[in-house]
Image: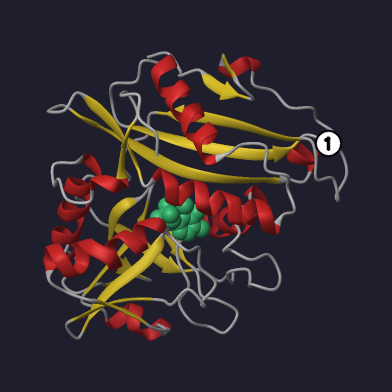
Amino acid sequence: MADFKIWMNGRLVLQAEAVLPVNSAAVFYATNVFEGLRAYWNERDGELYGFRLADHFARLRESMKMMRFSVPYSDDELFEAVRAVLAGNEVQEDVHMHLVAYVGGAGLDATSPTGLYINPRRRQRVTEGKGVSACVSSWARTSDNAIPIRLKCGANYQNGRLAKLQAKVDGYDEPIFLNGRGKVAEGTGATFFMVRKGRLCTPTTSNDILESITRTTLIEDVAPNVVGMDVVEREIDRTELYTADEAFLCGSGYEITPVTSVDRFPVGRGEVGPVTRAIANGYMNLVRGVDSRHPEWRTPTYKPVRL
Ligand code: PMP
């Protein structure tokens, strides 16, 4: 299957034509900020729904602000760019997209010119109902006053790369980061949740995590309204990972990925638990529009509407 074309600064181009100068801050220092988001094909409606686009655009703006990028596009223009890349590629299937704002100029302190590209790709679900084996990484999550994880810049992901490769070398699927204070932070590109003593818990946003849109979706809707459990936001200790009844990672890319062991300790019975399964079903039904509540979170990308 051919790769999708990329939308780059207003034009649809082939992957091979979407290139940046080697001396740009974007290439040399990874001076970019980005969003990873998904659009889901709904067969019944004949529509491709972008999930929580406005929230992704808002977070991109926060990242751009912190990085002192100029903001060349309005939200309407960002939405039109998403539509252009999906319609231009005639996408009628689930798709994952990276929306990347970058600095094309050279130098550590370069702030312009700012470019934008959107790279749609087919992306497998991380697991189809199966759990992953996780480890506590010996790499600490970078802290808010060093390279803040709230800021979604490409360079941050080197922290994730170190941990991910170490985990793989050591025979695990996924690392879980502790923060500088030794409390549970998150996965490399996903938020951590656990069920322990009957409560569904996740670290607060002051634990060196990205302010995840999936996390918000579970807190605001899926957990209380579909599964009947309010989410407790609190600090989580390392030993709670070993004594949890259920655990999962979540994110736009990871969706709901069950964790069935941590450091070889089985989580609960070492199987995907009932709460995780219910959360996963509830989340997938919502993003695809099988569950028709919250239409404001699903932006049709085929029909000519605005956010
Ligand atoms: N943490 C990090 C570091 C991430 O990159 C992601 C993926 N964007 C997440 C958490 C999950 O965030 P979201 O639910 O907004 O995709």
Camera-nearest residue between 169 and 45 = 45
> Relative to 96, does residue 47 appear above or below in the rendering?
above
> Relative to 148, does residue 162 appear above or below in the rendering?
above
Q: Relative to residue 303, is residue 227 drawn left or right? A: left
Q: Relative to residue 118, is residue 241 drawn left or right? A: left
Element class at badge 1: loop
Residue at image coords 58%, 39%: 74
Q: Residues within 10 Å of mark 1 (few under 14, many from 20)?
A: many
Residue 249 x %, y %: 34, 61
Residue at image coords 13%, 47%: 291
Residue 68 x %, y %: 75, 53
Q: Relative to residue 115, is residue 256 drawn left or right? A: left
Residue that carries the numbered disc 1 in the rendered image = 105
Residue 228 x %, y %: 12, 71
Camera-nearest residue between 49 and 71 = 71
| Quadrant (top left/top right/bottom left/bottom right) for the C terminus | top left
- From where the camera sits, is residue 167 visible? no
Ligand 1 within 8 A of label 1's CB?
no
- From where the camera sits, is residue 207 visible? yes
| Quadrant (top left/top right/bottom left/bottom right) for the N terminus | top left
> Relative to 210, does residue 266 appear above or below in the rendering?
below
> Relative to 36, does residue 281 appear above or below in the rendering?
below
Residue 103 x %, y %: 75, 39
Q: What amino acid is labelled 1 in the image? A: Gly
Residue at image coords 37%, 85%: 239
Residue at image coords 37%, 34%: 123
Image quarter of residue 163: bottom right
